[in-house]
Structure formats: C-alpha cells, structure tokens
Image (tube, rainbow, N blue to C red):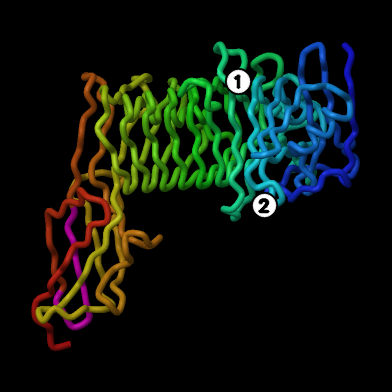
Amino acid sequence: MTKTILILTYVLLLTAPCSRMACGGGADDPPPSVVYDPAGNVITAANFTDQAPCTLKALLAADRAHGWNVIQQRAADDVYTCNATLLIGENDRGSTCFQIGTETAPRETLVMRGGLYIIPPYVRNVNDNLKSAGALRKLNRPVPYNSLVLGVAGNTNITPALKFEAGPAGAVGRFCAGVLYPGKLTGYQARLAVYNGVIAPAETAPAASIDSELYCGLIAVNSRLSGFRKSFFFGARGDWTSVSNCIFENSGLGVINTTAPLLVKNSVFRNCDVAFGDWGGPMNLTLDGCVLENNRRNWRVQRGSVSLLDCVVGPAAGEDELLSRDQSGPLPEIIVRRRLSVQVVNQAGKPVPNADVMLIPEQPDPALLPGRAATGPDGFTPAAGDLHALVALDYRLQASKLHRQPERTDYSYEIIVAAPGYPEQSWPGVRFSQNGMVIKIVLDGKTDQ
C-alpha cells in the first residue's frame, strides 16, 4: 500500500495549546506526522502533543505540499473541507491532540465528507502489551490519549464548528471515538472536548444525519451537539467527563448506558427520539438543572438509576418507558429531587439567624437521610443555587415487576426548627414539588433562655 508522508515539526504549528488538556506523550515518542493513504483515502495525524496539537492549517499545509487535493479551505470564513477519512492518533504508540479553533483562528469550521475517528490507544486483546491506563499509572508511566478538542477552555471568543456532510448510514457522516479503523473494535483513552463549539450536520444535510459511535471521555461546555442518527454520547468511559450548559437536539438518542457516574448540568435535551436511556446496559446518570422538551420520549430506562435534580421535564409526544429488563436485579428508577430554602422569622417578621433547620422524611426509605442546615443573618438557609442548599426528594418512579406502568411514590417531610431562645417546633406533611421553593417558617414566642 503506497503512502505519502509529511513529517511536521513543532516549529510549523503556530497554534495555541489544548488548554487544560493533557494528551500524554514523552521524550521517546515518535515525531509528529501527517500521513495520507491514497488507496484508502485516509489521512492519519499522529503524535501531536497538547503544546503543539495538529491543526487544520497543518492539514492544509501537508495537502498542498504533496498535492493530495483532499483538503480545501474557504479563506473568507475559515471553513475547511476534508474529502477523506480523518484518523486522529494511532492504536499502538504515542498520543495525539487535534485542535479546531485557536486564538489566531477563533471561528474555524471543519466540514467532513469522510468519516472522523479518534483512535483508542489501548484495545483489549489487540495491544495488551501496552497495558491499560490503570496498569500504567501503577507503574508511574504516562498514559497515552488521543484527543479531539474544539475551542479553548474559558475562552468564549473562540467558537469553532465540526460538521458532517450527509451520506448513507455507515458511510460518510460517520463520527467515532474509541473505535478502531477499519472495523468496530472499541477501546480506551479516547477523548472529545467541545468548548463553546458546535457539532452538527452540514447545512446541506438532513437534521439527523451523523452516524456515531462515541466511547470516550467527554467534556462539553456551552456547546451545541445536534443531528446524530443514534446517540451523541454512549457511556461515560473513564473519569474524564464534564458536561454543562449545552444543547443536545435533533438526534435519535441522547445519553445512553452511563457505565461510570455521569453528571450533566444546566443543559437542554430537545427534539430527540429519546433524551436519555439505555440499551440494557448500566445507567448511572444525574441531570442537574436540565430541561427536557419536545422529545418523543424523555426516557427509556431498563437498568440502573437516573436522578433529576431541579430539572424541568416537558411532556413527551409518546410514552416514557421505565421497564425492568433484569427481574432478578434492582428495579430501574427515576428519582426527582428539588433544592429548597427555608426562611425563619419571628412573629414580628424579623429574621431569626442561627436557627437549626432539619428535614425529616416521613416515608420509610433506607436511602433517605434527614437534611440539615442553619439560617444566616438574613434568616434563610443557603439558597437553592448554593452547594449547601437543602435537597428534598419529591417523588420516585420505579419499574414494576407486575405491571408495565412504573410505580410512583410521593415523599413528604417534617420540618423541625430549633433556634436560640425559642422552643423547638415542627411542621409535618410538607411537600416539595417545585424547583427552588422557599418555605417561610414563623416561630412562636421566645422562651426565658
């Protein structure tokens, strides 16, 4: 197989580093390179570090230097088109970091007419001699990672985009992370980071036209991910995951099979076939401050647990599903919780500071613990947006072994307040059915203390 190779030195890569990302690498790693295989129409970018990542400018320079004619640039709006499959990194050595959007090119867009793969550096039974990340850490050796980064953390002026042209399922428009090429073997140590960016179909493509297999660590901040035929995120692979202030839309499936605990904050899931769920695998998901709207189904959960904290759940066009796939295991459940604040005043309406406020669950549930907080000088416990705010369980949906419809349990609390100079008082039967509720407590007369 004939290959044309261009070796690029770090001096040629005039670009900003992948902020706050460690792509690994060491002194003995091979030099960075861009390799084109005309027989397979495949470009491989390998061994670029976070200090000097591979960039669209580097791809274009390689293309022009060797006459490949697979990379095009529309300089007027900084749009690059790749007419080949692009592989980021290799499976058997080193680390690679590829970046779209830098301080000198803040609005770069890459349009893919071929597939894009973030190659896993480690795959079981393929290169076990390289050892897994856990084994490498025990040996105090660097762990290789292949990573794609859109944007720069903390810089909202850099707004890159990655777009895919439409094509038949399994052909062009294919976006994979943690998947070997060619083939479908999945592995570890692939990463995708999107800061203030967009991943979506190209303007000429249908609304949901990106085929995807994403088995990777994911960071997505203030970004929009749209147009995936299947899921825009399959599982939380590894401990390198953070998702906040994003819009996930116009896709078949949202978050699927979260192997490790996954927290998604202040994000919107809309116009999806299923916003979150599983294919029979584990589910360990928390949505905090998220909005689910205009979905055909908000969820389809068969195993595991999902916690909705201060979320807004709009009506689904179809029926949400909470079914037990494994009758011998724990029943899958949806838990709805709310943050709240308690205001304590005296009979004259003045705030009572240093009051000890307790929330005592009234339903027997071994998973429920009492909540406790103290009022400040203004008479309030920490506000709903505070990390130390009180949290109450509103209701729990649990799959039934006997019925298709889940069983719902509503929860109520007894509020107990003890304040200096006042008798301890309690208020039973309090429900917390709205986000950000403020409960006002008026204490009776003072004691002689």
Q: Is residue 331 visible?
A: no
Q: Amino acid at mark 1?
A: Arg
Farthest residue toward the bottom? 448
Secondary structure beneath label 1: strand
Q: Residue at x 71, y 18 (%)?
A: 181
The Cα atoms of the two marked residues, 2 and 1, are separated by 27 Å
The picture quadrant where one finds residue 137 is top right
The picture quadrant where one finds residue 426 is bottom left
Q: Which mark is residue 174?
A: 1
Q: Is residue 251 visible?
A: yes
Q: Which residue is mark 2?
A: 20
- Residue nearer the viewer, 315 or 256: 315
Q: Residue at x 63, y 28 (%)?
A: 111
Looking at the image, residue 423 lies above or below residue 90: below
- Residue nearer the viewer, 114 or 17: 114
Q: Amino acid at mark 2?
A: Arg
- Mark 1 Cα-neighbour bin, 10 Å: few <14, some 14–19, many ≥20: many
Q: Residue at x 12, y 83 (%)?
A: 446
Farthest residue toward the front? 76
